Image (cartoon, grey):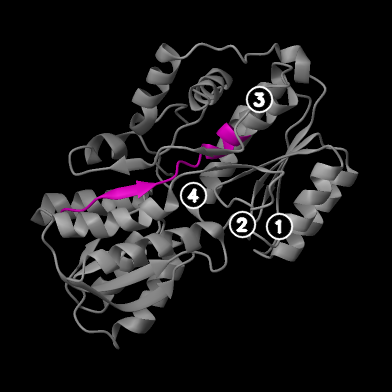
Amino acid sequence: MRARRFVLRSLAAALLAGAAFPGAVMAADTAKKKIALSNNYAGNSWRQAMLKSWDKVTRDAVAKGIVAAAPSFTTAENQATAQAAQIQNMILQGFDAIVVNSASPTALNGAVRQACDAGIVVVSFDGVVTEPCAYRIAVDFKRLGSMQIDYFAERKLKGNLLQVRGLAGVFVDDEIHQGTVEALKKHPQFKQVGSVHGNWTQTVAQKEVAGILSTLPPISVVATQGGDGFGVAQAFKAAGRPTPVIFLGNRHDELTWWKEQRDANGYQTMSASIAPGSSTFAFWVAQQVLAGAKVPKDMLLPLSTVTQATLDAALKDTEPGGVVNVEYSQKEVIAFIDKSKR
């Protein structure tokens, strides 16, 4: 798997070129530390890519003696109670830091507080938690929702909109949905006529959209959250309905379908998502906190975007079954932290 993806190469280069590393630490400082990943869900391509990135980068960190161990744990079901119990077990197992992709922004706060009280560093990413003692790493998910409506408006599109959401109750879904709702208020030329939860998964999205399509008027545009765009397209095709403009989420199957439609009939759209490699950013943040670095509690990563002009390069640089990605190095994260404090 390529360690660098085209979308964020320029960002990494800028960080490395423009930032000094006053917070850098020697690997020996955390050589005996153990960092665990608590993950609430692994049922789609983004989560699989996220876990793969974590495993690749942390195995290398362990091999180099930067940390002693960095295992990942995923709950069997997307239940906050199960993940809270998982975190409590990590406390008992003596981990020095816990990186969390949370099932809920609030339901894990008690377990997170217990970890902090035990002297454990907690770093949440993607699905972040609101407990003040934890660190939070995300993208501007509200912007991910609003940019879709803005894009449709820039294209001079109008008409009925279908919204395909993610996992119910998760921070990411709530934030993207809120961004979409707020943007729709600014663009009255669009009318939302339906909404389903696709769980960021192609098969679920296809089933849920297929189940509602017969009740809906003609659809002009579809706002999504990633991992669901290809399933949406398949549902419209199976129903014999015209394909709307579907905002996509950087998955290989979505980009492949987009290229096929573009080559066949000039289909145009856009795609955006948080990179799965955000897990590696969270890992290095945890390692830096353990090493004594001063790190901001809240950090925003850039969105990975694919446009009509960059589609071919994105598809070439993304593995089948994968997602447009970037995996962060220790130096890149130190540079990012330093720049964020300026």
Residue 95 place in picture, x, y as percent: 82, 37
Residue at numbered disc 1: 75
Amino acid tagged 4: Trp
- Looking at the image, the residue that sits furthest to the bottom is 215
On whether residue 42 falls in the magenta region, the answer is no
In the image, the segment drawn in magenta is 268-282
Return the disc, 3 or 1, that comes first in the chain's sequence: 1
Residue at numbered disc 4: 46
2 and 1 marks in contact (CB < 8 Å): yes
Residue at numbered disc 3: 294
Return the disc, 4 or 2, that comes first in the chain's sequence: 2
Amino acid tagged 1: Thr
Amino acid tagged 2: Tyr
Amino acid tagged 3: Lys
Within-10-Å neighbours for mark 1: few <14, some 14–19, many 20+: some
On whether residue 274 falls in the magenta region, the answer is yes
Left or right of 85: which side holds 337? left
Residue at numbered disc 2: 41
